[in-house]
């Protein structure tokens, strides 16, 4: 933490970063969503960006965390936590102490339970609002941030949220820049002690490599052979659609316009 | 008329006797035309069932007699008594449920999604596990799908989807993206009825977000990414589940907690029963709270930039489009993503990545407008999952019309032109009003 850097006018931003896992090799790396979060923080003008990680420092995580430093940072705060610990208290205390205006996190971790709950628990504990699935931060002014949230189907929604707030980053956020090797080597990992709480629940669960999910069968429930045959052989049919014959183009267009309005696809 | 059938043996006898001089008259009186639809089965005077094999079946399109033994034909003869398929499912009513299973469906576009139905199927499994103490499935829907169709809940298929009780919360404060107000409502529900299970879809459409907020507020540790649930006597709630974690690379086997965020296809949707979907109201008014998150509405995105497979609204062109300039203009005015049939692509009018169908893209649009597309099976395959299909075509007999929910028979260029004019006019009016 660098409390001295919180001079007026600048926006204090903390990005929570975690150690990712390459989906094929299983090697440690920057977590994709967290790296996008760091990139997002870079796009904010006048922001003082801090990186914060809670976890263990070992060979694998060192390389991954230095990946974030290589995106243009001098240091990263690391709250020392053993494996299998609940990092919530450590992070909450660190954030309370540092008091950033905006906390950026990824939606889900790439290791461990990966439930995506941490930002929500942090928000609940700190009493801050949370916005999920961000694509961009448009503006921060007067203690209010204007955000662009990514919706399914490539849609976007504009939101305003009162700061301080926690936001999580969607895969629609800008792709992270490459990590430069030199700065990654030179950067510092500031290891700090932090309260430790064991995650007792998770120790009870059995983890196993994900099984392929069974493909759903198309079950045809039909009383008679004829219905079964029809279900197997028939073409997709809407059935009972409205057909407008002998109408002027204007009447036809009117009907289509009504349907489009009802479905809400016209803006 | 009463349902009791009065028999007139003499009339029946005449109806059977084709040579009787009054045969046709009597048939007409019985409301059937001669030859077709004469009684094929009746109770004889001695209580024996008599059959008339000539009266069975109907004449098919090629003039050949077809006999349909599925029962559908018999059903038609009894006329008004024929019930719709939905009504024929047994109605299950649960008067005094032993417990409640609360489900918060996404209701994307004001309809239950496939994911919602799977989740309701799972809720039914949980509720019906013990026949001695059955639970009820309580669905909560937030009205005011402000963007999608003026807050209407579109197809009211809640009963068929397995909902016993329905809580519909409306009001401007829960419209749009209002996670805090919705969370307030869920917490109020939790306090009022204390459901044994909470089920939410783990989906980008809102369930994932709301479910995690609820978990944090209630202090329950949820199971996320659940895709399998099995009975287990040792677990506290009697169930255990398999949950995906670590970016989909691990499965956690764990006792099922009270709050579950489940993936699509976690269970089979309800298909055999109908349920009451009785409306409920919250005993207390929702607490007023100050919204720290303000929804400024959806942002117009460039429809051409949206991937075809994801697009919500597609205007698709086929061989029936002649004026391509006008088509592109229409897509722009409507704000639709452009699609095409293979012919339009092969002829070079549209790019290859715009092709919809078996060898192109399988689209998932909510609204698909097919302009001058005949509806070849290869094309229809690609639009299987579309909610609403609109067809503009000259040929009233083509397959696309059969698939379409709304079909306009006419020249594509003229209809599109009129549609563009309408949209522009309504925009103009809105601008003047504002
Ligand atoms: C192996 C294989 C794979 C294929 N894969 C695909 C695929 O992925 N996608 C695909 O689309 N096709 C595919 N096809 C081609 C498919 O079989 C059809 O040939 C094609 O879909 C027909 O395109 P169309 O409907 O645009 O043209 P047409 O069949 O020529 O239909 C044109 C329609 O426009 C109407 N029309 C004409 N003039 C007007 C007018 N002025 N106003 C309004 N309506 C008018 C006509 O009545 C007609 O219904 C495939 C074929 C094969 C063999």
Image: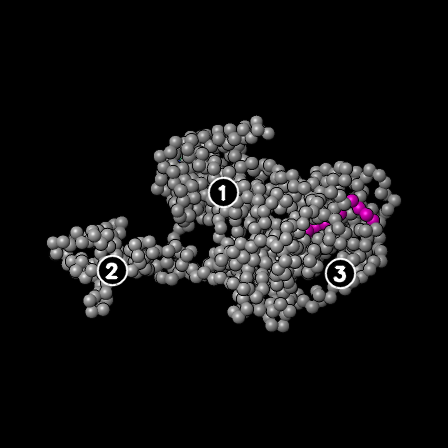
Crowding around mark 1 (Cα neighbors within 10 Å: few <14, some 14 to 19, many 20+) is many
Q: Which residue is mark 2?
A: B6
**Which quarter of the figure is the C terminus of chain A placed in?**
top right
Q: Nearer the viewer, mark 2 or mark 3?
A: 2
Subunit that carries the residue with mark 1: B
Image position of A122 with respect to B131: above or below: above
Q: Which residues are magenta?
A: A98-108
Q: Which residue is mark 1?
A: B367
Q: Along the line of sight, which residue is nearer the eye, A17 or B61?
A: B61
**What's the residue at 54%, 46% (across, down)?**
B109
Distance from disc 2 to disc 3, alpha carbons, whole Å, reads 79 Å
Is residue A141 at all visible to an observer of this figure? Answer: yes
Q: Which residue is mark 3?
A: A86
Left or right side of B215 for B272: left
Tell me where residue B87 appears, x and y as whole percent.
Answer: 41, 57
Label 2 with label 1: CB-CB less than 8 Å: no
Tell me the element at label 2: loop
Tell me where residue A135 appears, x and y as whole percent.
Answer: 67, 43
Crowding around mark 2 (Cα neighbors within 10 Å: few <14, some 14 to 19, many 20+) is few
Tell me where residue B414 appears, x and y as whole percent.
Answer: 42, 30
Label 2 with label 3: CB-CB less than 8 Å: no
Q: Along the line of sight, which residue is nearer the eye, B196 or B365?
A: B196
Left or right side of A16 for B414: left
Tell me where residue A161 appears, x and y as whole percent.
Answer: 71, 42
Asked whether mark 1 and ligand 1 are closer than 8 Å, the reply comes as no
């Amino acid at each position: 933490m660098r409390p001295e850097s919180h001079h007026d006018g600048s926006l204090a931003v903390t990005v929570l970063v975690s150690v990712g896992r390459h989906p094929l090799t299983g090697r440690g790396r920057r977590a994709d969503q967290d790296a996008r979060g760091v990139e997002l923080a870079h796009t904010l003008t006048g922001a003082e960006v801090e990186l914060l990680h809670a976890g263990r420092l070992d060979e694998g995580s060192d390389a991954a965390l230095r990946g974030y430093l290589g995106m243009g940072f001098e240091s990263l705060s690391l709250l020392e936590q053993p494996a299998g610990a609940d990092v919530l208290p450590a992070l909450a205390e660190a954030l309370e102490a540092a008091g950033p205006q905006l906390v950026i996190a990824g939606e889900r971790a790439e290791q461990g339970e990966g439930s995506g709950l941490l930002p929500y628990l942090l928000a609940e504990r700190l009493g801050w609002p949370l916005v999920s699935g961000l694509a961009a931060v448009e503006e921060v002014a007067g203690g209010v941030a204007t955000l662009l949230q990514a919706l399914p189907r490539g849609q976007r929604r504009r939101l305003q949220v009162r700061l301080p707030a926690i936001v999580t980053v969607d895969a629609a956020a800008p792709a992270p820049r490459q990590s430069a090797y030199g700065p990654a080597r030179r950067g510092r990992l500031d290891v700090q002690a932090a309260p430790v709480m064991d995650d007792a629940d998770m120790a009870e669960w059995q983890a196993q490599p994900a099984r392929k999910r069974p493909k759903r069968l198309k079950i045809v429930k039909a009383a008679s052979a004829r219905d079964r045959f029809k279900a197997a052989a028939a073409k997709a049919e809407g059935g009972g659609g409205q057909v407008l014959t002998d109408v002027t183009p204007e009447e036809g267009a009117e009907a289509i316009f009504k349907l489009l309005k009802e479905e809400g696809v016209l803006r | 008329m009463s349902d009791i059938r009065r028999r007139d043996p003499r009339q029946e006898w005449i109806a059977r006797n084709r040579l009787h001089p009054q045969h046709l008259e009597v048939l007409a009186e019985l409301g059937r035309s001669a030859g077709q639809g004469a009684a094929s089965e009746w109770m004889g005077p001695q209580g024996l069932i008599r059959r008339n094999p000539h009266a069975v079946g109907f004449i098919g399109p090629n003039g050949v007699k077809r006999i349909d033994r599925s029962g559908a034909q018999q059903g038609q003869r009894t006329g008004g008594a024929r019930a719709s398929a939905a009504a024929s499912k047994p109605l299950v009513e649960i008067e005094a449920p032993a417990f409640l299973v609360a489900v918060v469906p996404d209701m994307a576009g004001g309809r239950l999604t496939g994911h919602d139905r799977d989740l309701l199927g799972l809720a039914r499994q949980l509720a019906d596990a013990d026949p001695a103490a059955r639970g009820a499935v309580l669905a909560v829907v937030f009205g005011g799908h402000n963007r999608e169709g003026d807050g209407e809940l579109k197809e009211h298929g809640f009963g068929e989807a397995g909902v016993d009780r329905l809580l519909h919360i409306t009001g401007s404060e829960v419209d749009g993206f209002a996670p805090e107000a919705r969370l307030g409502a869920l917490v109020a529900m939790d306090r009022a009825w204390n459901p044994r299970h909470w089920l939410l879809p783990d989906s980008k459409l809102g369930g994932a977000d709301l479910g995690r907020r609820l978990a944090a507020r209630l202090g329950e540790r949820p199971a996320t990414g659940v895709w399998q649930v099995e009975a287990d006597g040792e677990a506290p709630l009697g169930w255990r589940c398999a949950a995906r974690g670590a970016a989909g690379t691990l499965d956690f086997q764990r006792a099922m907690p009270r709050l579950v965020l489940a993936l699509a296809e976690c269970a089979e949707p309800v298909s055999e029963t109908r349920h009451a979907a009785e409306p409920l109201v919250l005993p207390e008014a929702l607490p007023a709270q100050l919204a720290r998150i303000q929804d400024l509405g959806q942002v117009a995105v460039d429809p051409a930039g949206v991937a075809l497979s994801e697009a919500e609204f597609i205007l698709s062109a086929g061989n029936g489009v002649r004026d391509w300039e006008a088509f592109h203009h229409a897509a722009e005015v409507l704000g639709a993503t452009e699609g095409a049939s293979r012919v339009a692509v092969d002829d070079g009018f549209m790019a290859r990545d715009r092709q919809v169908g078996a060898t192109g893209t399988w689209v998932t649009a909510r609204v698909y407008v097919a302009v001058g597309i005949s509806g070849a099976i290869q094309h229809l395959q690609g639009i299987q999952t579309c909610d609403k299909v609109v067809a503009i075509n000259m040929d009233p007999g083509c397959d696309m019309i059969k698939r379409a929910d709304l079909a306009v028979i006419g020249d594509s260029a003229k209809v599109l032109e009129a549609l563009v004019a309408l949209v522009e006019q309504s925009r103009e009016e809105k601008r003047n009003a504002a």
